Amino acid sequence: MPHPPPGYFTHGLEADPELEAAINGELARQRDGIELIASENIVSRLVLAAQGSVLTNKTVEGAAYARYYGGAAFADAIEALAIERAKKLFKCRFANVQPHSGSNANAGVFLGLLKLGDAILSMVVAAGGHISHGHKATLTGRDYKIAHYGVNHESELIDLDQVRDLARASHPKMIVAGGSAYPRAIDFATLRAIADEVGALLLVDMAHFAGLVATGLYPHPFPHAHVVTTTTYKSLRGARGGMVLWNDESLSRRIDAGVFPGVQGSVMLHAVAGKAACLGEALRPEFCAYNEAVLANARALAATLANNGLRIVTGGTDMGLMLVDLTATGITGDVAAKALEKAGLAVNKNMIPFDPRPPEAPSGLRLSSNAGTTRGFGACEFERIGGWIARIVRNPSDLRGIKDMREEVLALCGAFPIY
Ligand SMILES: *Cc1c(COP(=O)(O)O)cnc(C)c1O
């Protein structure tokens, strides 16, 4: 066997037909289906190229320009570019672009800024919080004392009185805001006032609304938040990974050390390049137009569903994401999601606030306009999608109807091609 084997440096996926078939299957799924899952988006060729580049070969550890390994000149330049762009986009003084994921960004911040056993006050998953904010199944839930706030029963908005009461009772060192299924604007100023009253830091995890923050379409977590975390592949439409942002220099050493070596090792430089790429795109005027469309489309979708008798949790949304309460239809989120998938509509089942049903068969669906907007859908298309969803959740076993709808979905996708 010669080394390297023939084709090692020249062949692509065709060298592995089994893998190629699966990846092409996924490409076809993305092309031919409508993506409504809120944690997804459709990245540019530029982001794909950066993430698929030779940067995957380079190992660096530590901060840019202070690496443990040599040969890091380009690595340093790439990471510095991502940091500069992140700071410019979110108008802050410091950024760490190394977290491999949103969960790692949060874990790094906790590890850097808290002591083992410190109390954290965060939103409960059942009300829309994220599992990485201290759920008991995670390391964060084991290492810290967690208290959870929720939403008000009537308004379904964050119960700030409860946050204040719990803050006074549980003495958190950190209060966490931002979730994965909370569709409304968050009152960061009041949360900061509560944090100040009890001597806690305020962490805002903006994974689902970072794009809107960047473009001034959602309240900015700064100057209220001490620290902000985000994923870079949801509303930011970029590389898989996370980021940490802050303004207070006295936090820098601890945050950086919390990420590395605290919770992870060497840098995923290809992902950092992907972050630089998507942050560069987000700094362009087109990203403003995109986010305006995300909002308009989400509102069109929510209104269509509501007009078809489906209750939208909180009555609407302030971002791309919304929660649909299926209680009135008599079917559960898991059944609805499976039926919708047959028509080519990808959604996820989700708990609604005070859900009497279990997470495996919850009362709701979570939808988002992020990915559809990226492929060019406007309000018209989202109204059609809303109509399809309403029809299917009313009649999830109408296989004939679903088959016809699949054809319509294919036609719509064909009119808005990707890649
Ligand atoms: C998606 C999400 C995360 C976690 O991201 P991973 O990249 O899956 O670790 C963290 N926080 C919030 C609010 C999220 O929505």
Image (cartoon, rainbow, N blue to C red):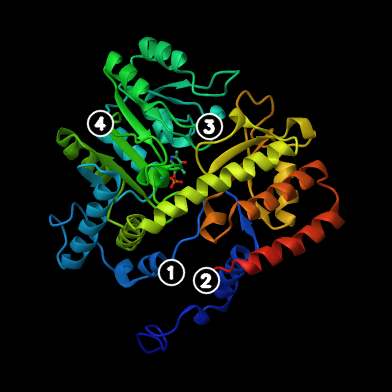
- Residue at screen point 70% across, 54% down: 341
Q: Which residue is mark 4?
A: 113
Residues at marks 2 and 1 touching, judged by CB atoms closer than 8 Å = yes
Residue 359 appears in the picture as rendered: yes
- Residue at screen point 41% across, 38% down: 218
Q: Earlier in the sequence, mark 4 or mark 3?
A: 4
Per the rendering, the mark at residue 303 is none
**Image quadrant in which you'd find residue 178:** top left
Indicate which label's residue lies in the foreground, 4 or 3.
Answer: 3
Per the rendering, the mark at residue 45 is 1
- Residue at screen point 38% across, 43% down: 230
Q: Earlier in the sequence, mark 1 or mark 3?
A: 1
Tell me residue 376's x, y (percent): 55, 60
**Which residue type carries mark 2?**
Tyr
Q: Earlier in the sequence, mark 2 or mark 3?
A: 3
Q: Which residue is mark 3?
A: 128
- Mark 1 neighbour class, 10 Å CA radius: few under 14, some 14 to 19, many 20 or more: few
Q: Earlier in the sequence, mark 4 or mark 1?
A: 1
**Which residue type carries mark 3?**
Gly
Is residue 258 found left or right of 322 in the rendered image?
Answer: left
